[in-house]
Amino acid sequence: MNQFDTEDAVQNTFIKLMHHPKPFDSTEHEKAWLIVTASNTCKDALRRASRREEPLDLHMELPAPADADPAAGGVLDAVLALPLKYRVPVYLYYYEGYSGAEIAAMLHKPASTIRNLLREARQNLKKQLGGDF
């Protein structure tokens, strides 16, 4: 985080304080609330900063690498060898850390479709890699 992000986090914390619906029991309670809220605000800012904003359309056309052989034993290689409809959600979920709802929003599909694609991909990977990979 840079200085400007830090200032934004402090400002957002105080905005949350201004919109806090009920009074605090004591100044100690208010201080504790501010510390926890500031900490969570900073964690959220760091989480957002760690994700690069890129249109997914740029990556949807990428073919699986020619050397991605599921028999080689590498899980990532097996994931990259999956068909595109499975590869993108699996990669976003397991390697990029997005939730199913976030992936659904990015791919403009229902969350249930993403869950089904992930389930089918896991079954496919289990067959390819043998057992519990």
Image: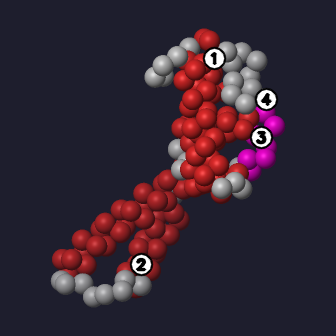
Position of residue 102 measured from the top left corner of the image (x, y, whole percent): 59, 54
The mark that comes first in sequence, 3 or 2, is: 2
Other-residue count near label 3 (Cα within 10 Å), few / some / many at <14 / 14–19 / ≥20: few
Q: Identify the element where label 1 is drawn.
A: helix
Q: Which mark is residue 63?
A: 4
For disc 1, the marked residue is 70
- Nearer to us of marks 3 and 2 is 3
Q: Identify the element where label 3 is drawn.
A: helix
- Nearer to us of marks 4 and 2 is 4
Q: Is residue 17 magenta?
A: no
* Residue 91, image quadrant: top right
- Please indicate whether residue 61 sits to the left or right of residue 11 in the image: right
Tell me the amino acid under the disc marked 4.
Pro
Label pair 4/1, CB-CB below 8 angstroms:
no
| Magenta extent | 55-62
Structural distance between the alpha carbons of marks 4 and 1: 15 Å
Structural distance between the alpha carbons of marks 1 and 3: 21 Å
